[in-house]
Every structure is written in structure tokens, then in C-alpha cells.
Image (cartoon, rainbow, N blue to C red):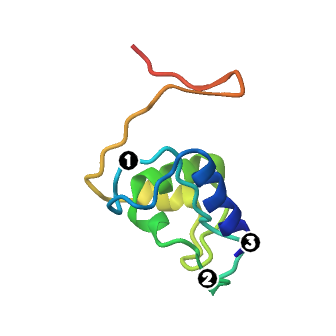
Amino acid sequence: GELSRRFKQLEADNGRRRDVPKFSARTLDLDILTYGDRVGVVDGVELPRGEILKNAFVLQPLADIAPEALHPVTGQSYRELWRDYRSDQKLWPVAFTWQGRQISVIAD
């Protein structure tokens, strides 16, 4: 719960507005996806977050950074979940630089 409150404050500090429609553009969106093997609502936070299994833009990066980690409900690795993911959701790369280091590049 404390981490979630800190995330909300970071979002606010970076211009996130909560007085707009739910799926409006945002400057920053931080979510707690998992916390160890905890399952259920823990201190007001849903764990693991349901979007992991629903949204390509959540699952694919999770599979990239933690491919062997296991989803605490399905027991499958994030690599396996991404491999088996079926949806028509489209993903595209964006150029991203963080702390002066280029994290991703858009190929020409």
C-alpha cells in the first residue's frame, strides 16, 4: 500500500491528472504488477495485476525483463505466457533515453 501511494505521488509530481476520463493520455503511469508470489488484494493493491494476462503492452516488456519469473497464479513463466499470447493488440517500438542512455531505438 505504501509503495502504491508513493507511485501515485510520483505520478502527480510528474503532471498526472486524475480529473480526466479514465483512459486519457498521461504523463506517467506506474503500476505494481507483482510482489513475490503474493496473490489477492494486499493493502488495497491487486496482486498480480490482471493486466499482465490481458494487455500485450504489459506482458511483452515483463517477458523481456523477467522471462523466467513465474506468474503466481498460472505458474507459467512470463516468456511462456508471451509465447502463447493470442490477441490482435499491436505493439510498436518507441525511442527511449533514460539517464542519458539510449534504452531503445527505432530502426529505419
Q: Report the front residue among 17 and 98.
A: 17
Give the mark, 3 or 1, whose residue is nearer the N terminus: 3
Report the residue marked by disc 3: 2
Establish if 24 lies above or below 46.
Answer: above
Contact (CB < 8 A) between labels 3 and 1? no
The percent position of residue 28, horizontal first and vertical second, equals 53, 47
Between marks 3 and 1, how big is the CA–CA gap?
25 Å
The percent position of residue 68, horizontal first and vertical second, equals 66, 57
- Is residue 17 toward the left or the right of residue 33 in the image? left
Query: Residue 25, labelled with which disc?
Result: 1
Contact (CB < 8 A) between labels 1 and 2? no
- The residue lying at 74 percent from left, 72 percent from top is 2
Between marks 1 and 2, how big is the CA–CA gap?
24 Å
Residues packed near mark 1 inside 10 Å, few (<14), some (14 to 19) or many (20 plus): few
Type of amino acid at the residue the image marks with label 3: Glu
Q: Quadrant of the C terminus?
A: top left
Type of amino acid at the residue the image marks with label 2: Gly
Q: Report the front residue among 99 and 35.
A: 99
Identify the secondary structure beneath mark 3. helix
Residues packed near mark 2 inside 10 Å, few (<14), some (14 to 19) or many (20 plus): few
Residue lying at the far top of the rendered structure: 108
Type of amino acid at the residue the image marks with label 1: Ala
Q: Quadrant of residue 7?
A: bottom right
Identify the secondary structure beneath mark 2. loop
Query: Residue 44, labelled with which disc?
Result: 2
- The residue lying at 34 percent from left, 53 percent from top is 24
Give the mark, 1 or 2, whose residue is nearer the N terminus: 1
